[in-house]
Image: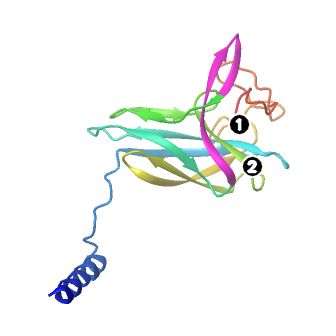
Amino acid sequence: MFRHAVVRLSSLIVLALVTGSGPAAAEPAATVTKAWARATPGGAATGAAYVVIEGIKGGTGDTLLAVATPAAGRAEIHTHIEQDGVMKMRRVEKIAIADGESRALAPGGDHIMLFDLKAPLKQGEPLPLTFTFEKSGQVTVTATIEAIGSLGPDTTAAGSGAAAAPDGMEGSGSGDGEGQH
């Protein structure tokens, strides 16, 4: 009897794999769009990526828990805060996205910080990013790498290639967690 049950269970597993009727994938509660990053100069160890996260309207919202990319040793979710009149960058553990909400991770605000870059981010090359959400699971997108100093796809900062902060914040790039990314 035991052997018959094992054979029957094995047959059901094979049938599920062949027909695709195994466990259903999680319904997406959030989507990731408009992914882009700035090119980095040679030798730079850090970079930043930006996206728009949209909660599916009529859904229950979702929470971004982590980001990864093969282009960097680690990726973190960051925000900017003002402390004693100085804008500083800080890691955040997660970002909640409400039902129907659109949340831009953009220069001067929340963004994805890339540490220990394995190679410079070069304009025009793809940058794969995998986002891990509480409900939607993993979502992989390909970011476009824009010019150094770009403010987003199809735009660039004026001048010598230095980023112009949209909110008037000046970037120091000192590597101490301060400045614009």
Which label's residue is closer to the chain start, 2 or 1? 2
Identify the residue under disc 1.
Answer: 156
Residue 139 percent location from the top left of the image: 46, 53
- Choose between 176 and 158: the one closer to the eye: 176
Q: Are the residues flagged by discs 2 and 1 in contact, CB closer than 8 Å?
A: no
Residue at 74% x, 26% y is 178
SS label for mark 1: loop
Residue 100 percent location from the top left of the image: 34, 34
Amino acid found under the numbered disc labelled 1: Thr
SS label for mark 2: strand
Amino acid found under the numbered disc labelled 2: Asp
Residue at 66% x, 49% y is 74
- Horizontally, residue 84 falls left or right of residue 173, namely left
Q: Is residue 26 above or below residue 37?
A: below
Question: Label 2 neighbourhood size at 10 Å, few (<14), some (14-19), many (20+)?
Answer: some
- Horizontally, residue 163 falls left or right of residue 98, namely right
Q: Is residue 163 above or below residue 112?
A: above
Residue 81 disc label: none
Identify the residue under disc 2.
Answer: 116
Real-space Cα separation, disc 2 to disc 1, in angstroms: 25 Å
Residue depth check, mark 2 versus mark 1: number of the one nearer the observer: 2
Residue 172 percent location from the top left of the image: 80, 26
Magenta region, mostly helix, strand or loop? strand
Quadrant in the picture for residue 169: top right
Residue at 51% x, 33% y is 104
Residue at 34% x, 37% y is 61
Q: Which residues are magenta?
A: 72-89
